[in-house]
Amino acid sequence: MIVGTAGHIDHGKTSLVRVLTGVDTDRLKEEKARGISIDLGFAYLPAPDGSVLGFVDVPGHEKFVHNMLAGASGIDFVLLAIAADDGVMPQTLEHLAIVDLLGIERGLVALTKADLASPERRAQVAEEIRQTLVATRLAGADILPVSTVSGEGIDDLRRRLCGAAHTIHARSARGRFRLAADRSFTLPGTGTVVTGTVLSGAVSVGDRLMVSPAGLEARVRSIHAQDRPTELGRAGERCALNLAGDGISKDAISRGQMIVDPLLHAPADRIDATLKLLASESKPVNQWMPVRLHHAASEVGARIVLLGDTPVPPGGEATVQIVLERPIAAAAGDRFVLRDTTAQRTIGGGKFLDLRAPARKRRTPERLAQLAAYALADPQAALASLLELSPYYVDLSAFARDRALGNDGIALLIERCQALTVPTSSGTLLLSAANWLALKRGLLARLEKFHKEHPDLPGIGLEPLRLQLLPRLPAPGFISFLQGLARASEIGLDGAWVRLAGHAVRLVAEDEKLWSRIAPLLGGEERFRPPRVRDIAGLIDVNEADVRRLLKLLGRMGKVDEVAHDHFFLRGTVGEMVEIIVDLSAQATSGQFTAAQFRDRVDNGRKVAIQSLEFFDRHGVTLRRGDLRRINKHRLDLFRRPTEAGAGKFISGRESSPVGRPDFKSGRGREPVLGGFDSLSLPPYSGRAG
């Protein structure tokens, strides 16, 4: 159990901890000189059962409330010190408000300096304390008179604290590891040591961790938990971690950083949250109000964005968006406290709901419904609710990461929600069984309708199909969903075309006969430099218009691609050229290659090589800058068969294709094809979810 002190300056918090533990938590020279606590102090008390209670002693001066806040997060039990000769004072009220905002529900009141007060004064102050606690989470807490001078009540207080440790619900160590760093220092012969409270999970010697949001990788060399050397640190304990790694030093790890499981490193700078404004405030919270946000041991400037139509009144609660000056490492469900920009008073606090809050459409009914689901404390209930709300899928990887859930917790969520997964390159999407089935049925019905309306087309393009269906999955997730159906032989995938498994476009007998004469001219050793339409017509003595018509039709069927005007390549040959540019890019140190290098590999002459590369440029497969080109991984699947592209290897990201940009021109003779694209005209593509 972690015990945190609270109370006004000079009400005996540090003296009380010293008498209980034998440790003077005032370690700074200035603290000794001034006789007040300035920074956090730490001490430990061995309990009769062999466990250890950790103490976090906080400063009571109003100027150092920011240090008090750094130590208050993560405590299990509050020891509120109120001097019998003074009674309730301003910092008593502010500390009590902070304890309330942080959701700490267990504690007791130490009526300190009891030796200086008469029985009447004690009774008077005790009644004042009870009235003060009525509207807080500590209502009804025991009030115990104590004196560090006479020793009155000290043994009883120690027994009560040790007894409370047995009633505190232990924090689960099944999640992923998070430690809120409040101190960093160097020990001779040991190296960098970081201390803090373990908020979730467990850590072992040898584990690889991440300093977040700084992004430094670290390895755990040794651990002290509750002031004892150990091989394992768990949630609810104060730990000292001896860390090693590139860039790891006491100056590189400042108070406010989080030491986390590497999978949790995803700093947030825009967070949707619940906010409670203290009733003591004289003004409401208005739009874009500046504040200081305190979370765990971190402090950062922020702005409040109202998601409702009216300001938040004193004593009121609302859902808001917090826009931070810099990113922090946090988890959904974490508590926070807000102070004014002058650091003179605490104004409110609340709980984080969604760490990936949108900058746009943040007040729509759909978004507010999502936030109501995020507000559910139970992850299973929150996930089940989100699955029934637009967009009807959940990024399970992000959901689990932002709640610090471990693999066992994720598996349990999937099982209890009876949901279905769609794997992607960056994680896993989750759909309810009903919505997964609705998506599948909608897709098959759309394909069946399309084939009836366009029997001469091989299928519909991936992106047009995705945009017609609900739920509308992100592009990587939709591709993965399609690949699953293709493996089950329910649909067929031909490059960027999607069709029913049994659908096939066949040429009429006359066209089949003509194609049998043309196909050999486009393949074989000359496949990288096939003859143009005019030359084909001359070689087989056929009307040029008939050759062009047939090749255009075959282009719509996905058998050939018109790389340049009247210059058709077999689709397999285009796929070979894609593999060649991928190989050229992989061999280059910078990932960039020249037209000359491509020409030498395909051996088809400079003019045809340039035309081929310009074809890939138009489709976004290659990105050109001057004389150099690089591949665009987002578009490599356009001319490769799904088995070549690799299931689950699609990479999502920002728009990188020139197709669809205002300055892109398709050129002459490049007619769009209904429901998909021909060899020279692609529909606009977006790597983002719709």
Image (cartoon, rainbow, N blue to C red):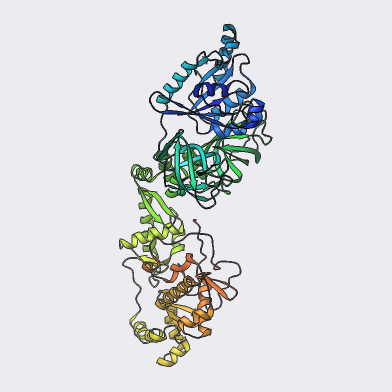
Quadrant in which residue 466 is drawn: bottom left
**Do we see residue 393 in this rendering?**
no
Q: Relative to 224, does residue 593 appear above or below in the rendering? A: below
Q: Position of residue 304 (x, y in %)?
A: 62, 40
Quadrant in which residue 649 is drawn: bottom left
Nearest the camera: 484 or 296? 296
Q: Looking at this view, name the residue that lies furthest to the front.
A: 189
Q: How many marks?
A: 0
Q: Position of residue 125 (x, y in %)?
A: 59, 13
Q: Position of residue 650 (x, y in %)?
A: 44, 62
| Residue depicted at x 56% and y 9% | 123
Q: Relative to 672, does residue 444 appear above or below in the rendering? A: above
Nearest the camera: 449 or 88? 88
Q: Position of residue 604 (x, y in %)?
A: 47, 85
Image-based side of 144 in relation to 388, left or right: right
Q: Looking at this view, name the residue that lies furthest to the right.
A: 342
- Quadrant of image for the N terminus: top left
| Residue depicted at x 50% and y 19% | 141
**Do we see residue 161 in this rendering?**
yes
Q: Relative to 47, does residue 612 appear above or below in the rendering? A: below
Quadrant in which residue 53 is drawn: top left
